[in-house]
Amino acid sequence: MDTMPDAIASAVARRVDEAGRVCVLTGAGMSAESGVPTFRGTQDSLWSRFDPMRLATADAWRADASLVWAWYRWRMRIVRQAQPHAGHRALAALARRHPCVSLVTQNVDDLHERAGSTVNAHVHGSLFALRCFDCGLAYDGPLGDFLSDAQRVPPMACPACGGGIRPGVVWFGEALPDDAWDAATDAARRCDLMLVVGTSGLVHPAAGLPALARRHGATVVEINPEPTALSGEADHVWRATAAEALPGLLAASA
Ligand code: OAD
C-alpha cells in the first residue's frame, strides 16, 4: 500500500465502501487524543506509573478497596472531563453512512457513545457500570463528587447487602463478560473488513479478534502510529493517530 497519507486514506476508504460488514476494534490509543492515558507505550501510560496488581485485581480490592476505588474515581474524573475527538465522531458518522459497522472496544470510557456511536461490545467492561463486589447487584445510585485527590476513598455500600461498589471493568484474572465477548466474536467472524485502531494487541483474548476475523476471510487494517504485536498479521498498516486517520477515512469514503 502507498505510504502517502491521502493514498492510504483512499485505499482504506475504498475497502470500507466495498465491504458488506465492517468491524472496528478500538483500544486505549483511540482515546489518547482526548487526554485519556493509554496503558502502555509512554512514561505517562497507566501501567508505567501504577502497579496493576495493586489496583486492577479482585485481590487488590480485597486487600485495600479504598485505594482501588480512589484510583478508579480519578480515572472516572479524567474520562468525565474528556471530550470525544474528531476520530470518535468520524466513526459515528461512518456507522450512519455505511450499511453495517460494528464497534467493539476494549475501552472502559464512554467517548464512543458520547460521539454518537452505538458500541456493540465493551469487552473489558465500562468504568461507569458499577456493581456490588459481593452480590453483583448493579448500582445506579449517586457517585459522589470526583474532585478529591484523596489516595483512599471508601467505596459506596451496596443497598442490598452492604458490600463495596466496584467499577464495572474487567480486572486481571477475571473473565470477560459473556454477552460482550459473544457480540465481539460474532462481529469478528462476520465482517469483511476489520479496522484495528489504537491497541497494542498484547492483552488476550481481545488481541485475538483480528486473527479470528482474518481466519474468516476479512481484510485487517491497523491504524496506529506505532508498530504493535498485531502489525505482522494486518493486511495493511496505516501509521497515523486515530484523530488523523479516521476523519481522513470518512472524507475519502463514498
Ligand atoms: P495499550 O495502552 O496497551 O496500547 C495503546 C496503543 O495505542 C499503542 O499501540 C499505541 O501505539 C497506540 N496509540 C497511542 N496513541 C494513539 C493515537 N493517538 N491514535 C492511535 N493509536 C494510538 O492499550 P490497549 O491495547 O487498549 O485492560 O490495552 C489493552 C488492555 O490492557 C486494556 O483494555 C486494559 C489494559 O490492561 C483492562 O483493563 C482489562
Image: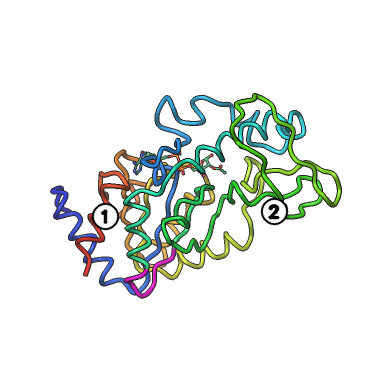
Q: Is residue 117 left or right of residue 13?
A: right
Left or right, residue 220 beside residue 177: left
Which residue is situated farthest in the right direction here? 161
Choose between 19 and 88: the one closer to the eye.
88
- x, y (%) of residue 18? 26, 72
Q: Secondary structure at mark 2?
A: loop
Residue sitting nearer the eye, 127 or 6? 127
> Looking at numbered disc 2 in the image, what kind of residue is underneath it?
Asp
Q: Which residue is mark 2?
A: 140
Labels in figure, total: 2
Is residue 98 found inside the magenta-colored segment of the image? yes
Q: Is 122 covered by the magenta stretch? A: no
| Image side of residue 240 versus residue 47, left or right | left
Q: Which residue is found at the position 26% from the left and 47% from the top?
A: 244
Residue at 51% across / 30% down in the picture? 47
**Label 2 within 8 A of ligand 1 by Cβ:** no
247 lies above or below 39: below
> Nearer the N terminus, badge 1 or badge 2?
2
- Picture residue at 66% right of the left edge, 46% below the top: 174
- Which numbered circle lies on residue 247? 1
User: Which amino acid lies under the numbered mark 1 shown in the image of this protein?
Assistant: Pro
Estimate the x, y position of residue 75 in percent, counting from the top left: 55, 37
Instruction: Please tell me in which quarter of the rendered image ligand 1 is found.
Output: top left
Tell me the magenta residue range: 96-102
Q: Secondary structure at mark 1?
A: helix
Residue drawn at the location 42% of the way across and 62% of the way down? 213
Query: Dot 2, how many residues are within 10 Å of its Cα: few (below 14), some (14-19), or many (20+)?
Result: few
Mark 1–mark 2 distance (CA, rounded to whole Å): 35 Å
